[in-house]
């Protein structure tokens, strides 16, 4: 009986903490300055750190693009989405056997794909091809990082 109570308490604790953890990814607000700073950091980083930093940059650019699209600035949002596509390819190129924080990169990419899916569902028909292509690139990068995590 005590085991069942303990198991129920742990399940309740886990389910109550999960939304808080998921909300933390959306709490930060990013702008072009933070994107530029992160791009500079990537240039100075070691190859071990680049995969995660590219995933973080991709996440920040997607969040800014979502905000720009919501405010009606489609031109800037489209430009950022095209950069996101190029960055998704760079994640693939920067992946190696000894990456740091590969699991964190995979989590960021999964969240980015989720945000792009939300954006795709709320977008107009003329924006959907670009969003679908971007989502496909991000999903491919996320799949590759997940496979690399499980390979270790």
Image (cartoon, rainbow, N blue to C red):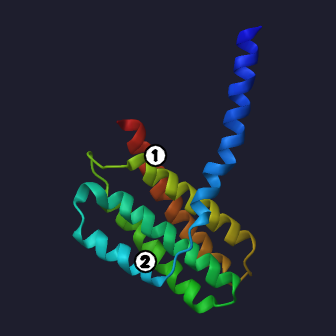
Label 2 vs label 1: CA separation?
25 Å
In front here: 112 or 141? 112
For the point 73% across and 81% down, the residue is 125
Mark 2 touching mark 1, by CB under 8 A? no
Count of marks placed on residues: 2
Element type at marker 1? helix
Q: Position of residue 116 (x, y in %)?
A: 62, 67
Q: Which mark is residue 35?
A: 2
Residue found at the very far top of the displayed protein: 1
Disc 2 packing (10 Å; few <14; some 14–19; many ≥20) = some
Q: Check the image and report above or below for 69 versus 56.
A: below
| Residue on which the image places disc 1 | 146
Q: Quadrant of the C terminus?
A: top left
Mark 2 element type: helix
Residue drawn at the location 41% of the way across and 74% of the way down: 86
Identify the residue at image location x=71%, y=29%.
11
Which picture quadrant has residue 45? bottom left
What's the residue at 51%, 51% (across, down)? 107
Single out the mark in the foreground, 2 or 1. Answer: 2
Give x and y (percent) for residue 102. Answer: 38, 49
Using a 10 Å C-alpha cutoff, classify the residue at mark 1 as few (fewer than 14 neighbours), some (14 to 19) or many (20 or more).
some
Q: Provide residue 53's location: percent of width, then percent of height.
A: 37, 63
């Amino acid at each position: 009986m005590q085991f069942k109570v303990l198991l129920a308490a742990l399940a309740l604790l886990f389910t109550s903490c999960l939304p808080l953890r998921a909300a933390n990814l959306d709490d930060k607000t990013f702008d072009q300055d933070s994107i530029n700073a992160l791009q500079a950091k990537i240039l100075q980083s070691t190859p071990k750190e680049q995969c995660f930093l590219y995933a973080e940059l991709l996440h920040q650019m997607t969040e800014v693009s979502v905000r720009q699209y919501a405010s009606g600035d489609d031109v800037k949002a489209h430009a950022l989405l095209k950069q996101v596509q190029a960055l998704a390819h760079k994640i693939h190129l920067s992946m190696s056997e000894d990456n740091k924080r590969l699991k964190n990169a995979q989590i960021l990419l999964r969240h980015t794909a989720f945000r792009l899916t939300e954006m795709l569902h709320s977008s107009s028909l003329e924006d959907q091809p670009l969003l679908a292509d971007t989502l496909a690139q991000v999903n491919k990068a996320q799949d590759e990082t997940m496979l690399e995590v499980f390979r270790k």
